[in-house]
Image (cartoon, rainbow, N blue to C red):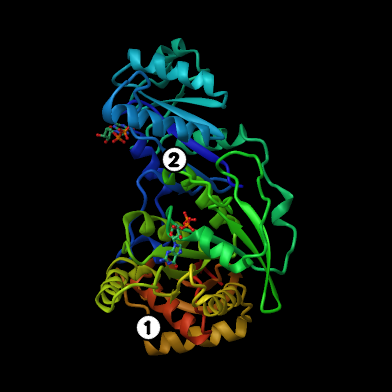
Amino acid sequence: MLPTIVLVGRPNVGKSTLFNRLTRSRDALVADLPGLTRDRHYGRGLGASKPYLVIDTGGFEPTADSGILKEMAKQTLLAIDEADVIIFLVDARAGLTPQEFSIAQTLRKAQRPVLLAVNKTEGMQKAIVSADFHELGMGEPLSISSAHGEGVRDLVELALETIVDKEDESTAANHDAPRIAIVGRPNVGKSTLVNALLGEDRVIAFDQPGTTRDSIEIHLEKNGKDYTIIDTAGVRKRGKVFEAVEKFSVIKTMQAIEDANVAILVVDAQDGITEQDAHVAAYILETGRALVVAINKWDGLKDDERDWIKREIDRKLQFLDFAKFHYISALRKKGLNELFDSVDVAFKAAMVKLATPQITRVLGEAVIQHQPPISKGIRPKLRYAHQGGSNPPIVVVHGNHVDHIKDSYTRYLAGVFRKAFQLVGTPLRVQYHQGD
Ligand code: GDP
Ligand code: GDP
């Protein structure tokens, strides 16, 4: 499981500025796609020695007893509960406020490692500024500037060092079977789908105790092939009603996606594409996992409703154009075989092995068709390409002046590779290597 860093602090100290700095993707194929909207509170941390998740809790008023502030405090407490380490952000320019003392008190009770970060210290005498914050009793204050990036890397590395290694063996087991995460908002039909896959007669006693972050792993044999299902909803006991909000955990969803080879994104056709659907889709794209989309509850929809949801998909999930969409009914067990055919195709594409001469030939043809445009008087020269990774496949292109290549050209190359190697269902990354 990936370590989770939670940002806590009162409003305006700079949490979202820090969050954006930690999660902003420089991947040309992910950065700027039509329809892609990132979650403003949950993200994948980038640019550190290892991957991690970040939660920005918004504003926190632990003493609030009504309305929206109380709701925010509740969300913050839930996030703290999911934290491996907390970054408590304070504002060097505003100094200490009474709110900070009550936040500190709440954090002490949480029994999680806490790093105290003093933000907005650019151009200030760091030692002097941070000394004021010793009084909080939250350890040595660390000076940073989220806006300018000063001290941010060190802060994150320090945070990650406090976390004991959370590698578990479960991911190592059952190597060949594709690992499939079934994800989506509450009530879209994830449990129904899992139950349909397992068959009515198999009642599963998976009452594993654990935190809200734990998912359940289920071994599945379908059409003579093995799969491991990572079930984020949990196979519920019949007749038991859970509240939708409580059973859904974004962190759990993100962890499951990280842990899988292929994600099945389940969407409720009756609701259309919501913001939360799009956010989960964005996580999948950022992790680079293979993807199959299941538009569920297709039964009982009228023709005009079906047309409507298809238009919704075109408009809001354009950035998933590499994936197959299936219109299914988990309840009626319709479309499940086809869904799994696409899972197989996506898994195979994600794990593809491409030989260097093969990729280099396709690169050569792509360049003949369409040369890299001249940028600032220089035309980049692309020489050869090799595969740099799987799940997602990464194509590393070697050449000169590769820093002059535009994102639009990278997208062009990705499209050419995708077509040439018939990579359906997996994102594909193109990276560059300068020289030789
Ligand atoms: P949040 O409410 O805690 O998420 O705070 P924001 O990230 O929205 O930041 C609040 C204000 O502080 C914004 O105007 C930011 O531009 C500013 N800010 C954030 N980080 C820094 C910093 O490192 N230095 C300075 N001078 N301003 C910052
Ligand atoms: P989860 O929260 O994503 O696990 O969703 P559930 O599997 O608990 O399903 C939520 C509700 O949607 C339940 O009442 C299901 O019976 C219903 N449901 C699930 N799949 C379908 C489907 O294919 N068609 C219809 N009409 N209802 C469905």
Horizontal and vertical percent position of residue 365 = 46, 89
Q: State the SS at label 1.
A: loop
Location of mark 1 (residue)? 371
Residue at position x 57%, y 51% in the image:
236
Location of mark 2 (residue)? 55
Horizontally, residue 124 falls left or right of residue 49, namely: left
Q: Is residue 401 visible?
A: no
367 shown above or below 313: below
Spatial CA span between label 2 and label 1: 42 Å
Question: What kind of residue is marked 2?
Answer: Ile
Q: In which quarter of the image is ligand 2?
A: bottom left
Q: State the SS at label 2.
A: strand
Question: What kind of residue is marked 1?
Answer: Gln
Disc 1 crowd, CA 10 A, few/some/many (<14, 14-19, 20+): some
Horizontally, residue 53 falls left or right of residue 18, namely: right
Q: In which quarter of the image is the C terminus?
A: bottom right
Horizontal and vertical percent position of residue 9 = 38, 27
Residue at position x 33%, y 65% in the image:
270
Q: Confirm or reject: label 1 Cβ below 8 Å from ligand 1.
A: no
Residue at position x 67%, y 62% in the image:
202
